[in-house]
Image (cartoon, grey):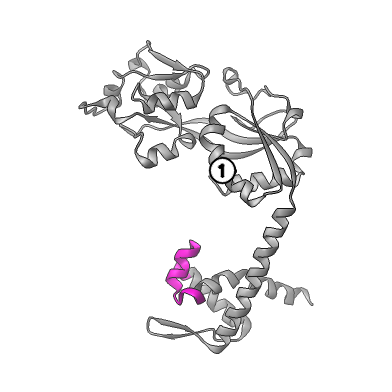
């Protein structure tokens, strides 16, 4: 097969999922909705497919869309091809095996990773997971010290700036602090500004003592931030639980409170988010990154923001 023919074949294979969706729905619009692309993109890809094959695949009469005889034949073949690829994908995933020792921060494990481990173990049943916690040093500012033993884990999930010496890192997401509270904290009060909110107790993360100061500086509130605090906690999962109990205002990473914001357990009394400059990373040695199980975890987490 010539390189040109191979290129055309690759293009045809790439558009089969689009054709299959359009054939199943009998609608470019519904196919576009399923695939997360525009109706125009579906139409153009089907048109290109028809031109490459020299066939008319759909008959169009007004808003009605139906498969032609050629289209029906291709639809049957497309289903078989896509099923073959899907079976092969599952077979390859099942072949990835071994133990994967993951070191992570306690709050990241409790509030983020646990929700994603189930899907990972279902996709890769032959991988055995060993989850342990690792320490972190937030006093170093812009530096990223390695406070865990890299040889004791296959991969670490932590927060920092992505500059761990002698290790390779993959950024999962940026760290964005969100000001939240439980509705019971405000009672009948109706604060109109961030300054009005500062009369309420603040919940402090004791190992990231500068969080409130950085937030206040970002919102030009440094001179209004009270110096006294009544409650401090070592981990974000403790801060979160205190906020759920209505004990005070909390600054929490958005990645850790997605569910609480979605179900209304916590809310933003006044939107005042702040990017810290940190991000959440997967960190491992270059040798570990070559392991199929580590690559599988990275790809899984990349699709589960």
- How many numbered circles are shown? 1
Quarter of the image where one finds residue 51: bottom right
State which quadrant residue 101 falls in. top right
Give the percent coordinates (x, y) of residue 242. 40, 23
Whole-percent x and y of residue 97?
74, 47
The residue drawn where x is 48% and y is 61% is 36
Q: Position of residue 4 (x, y in %)?
A: 73, 75
In the image, is 101 to the left or to the right of 27?
right
* Residue 11 visible in the picture: yes
Q: Up-down: is 173 above or below 65? A: above
Q: Main secondary structure of the magenta part?
A: helix
In-front residue for pair 271/30: 30
Task: Kindly give the residue lying farthest to the bottom in the view shown.
Answer: 69
**Quadrant housing the N terminus:** bottom right
Give residue 39's position: percent from left, percent from top: 45, 69
Q: Which SS class for mark 1?
A: helix
> Quick check: 200 above or below 101?
above
- The crowd level at tag 1 (other Cα within 10 Å; few <14, some 14-19, many 20+) is some
- State which region is magenta: 23-40
Q: Measuring 73% from the left and 32% from the top, which residue is drawn there?
A: 167
Quarter-of-image position of residue 146: top right
Name, please, the residue furthest toward the left.
188
Is 137 one of the magenta-colored residues? no
Mark 1 sits on what residue?
116
Q: Is residue 140 above or below residue 65?
A: above
Q: Is residue 278 visible?
A: no
């Amino acid at each position: 097969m010539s390189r040109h023919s191979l290129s055309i074949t690759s293009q045809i294979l790439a558009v089969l999922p689009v054709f299959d969706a359009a054939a199943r729905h009998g609608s470019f619009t519904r196919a576009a909705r399923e695939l997360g692309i525009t109706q125009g993109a579906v139409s153009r890809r089907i048109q290109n497919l028809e031109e490459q094959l020299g066939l008319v695949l759909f008959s169009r009469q007004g808003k009605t869309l139906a498969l032609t005889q050629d289209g029906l034949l291709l639809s049957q073949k497309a289903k078989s091809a896509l099923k073959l690829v899907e079976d092969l994908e599952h077979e390859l995933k099942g072949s990835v095996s071994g133990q994967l020792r993951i070191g992570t921060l306690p709050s990241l494990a409790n509030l983020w990773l646990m929700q994603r481990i189930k899907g990972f173990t279902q996709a890769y049943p032959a991988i055995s997971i060993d989850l342990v916690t690792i320490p972190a040093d937030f006093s170093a500012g812009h530096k990223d010290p390695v406070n865990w033993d890299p040889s004791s884990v296959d991969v670490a999930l932590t927060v920092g700036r992505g500059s761990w010496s002698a290790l390779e890192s993959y950024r999962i997401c940026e760290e964005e602090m969100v000001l939240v509270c439980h509705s019971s904290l405000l009672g009948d009060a109706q604060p109109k500004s961030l300054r009005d909110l500062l009369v309420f107790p603040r919940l402090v993360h004791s190992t990231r003592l500068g969080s409130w100061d950085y937030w206040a500086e970002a919102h030009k509130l440094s001179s209004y931030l009270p110096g006294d605090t009544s409650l401090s906690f070592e981990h974000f999962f403790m801060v979160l639980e205190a906020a759920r109990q209505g004990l005070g205002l909390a600054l929490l990473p958005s990645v850790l409170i997605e569910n609480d914001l979605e179900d209304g357990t916590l809310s933003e009394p006044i939107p005042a988010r702040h990017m810290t400059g940190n991000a959440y990373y997967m960190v491992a040695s270059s040798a570990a990154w070559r392991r199929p199980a580590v690559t599988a975890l990275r790809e899984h987490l990349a699709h589960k923001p």
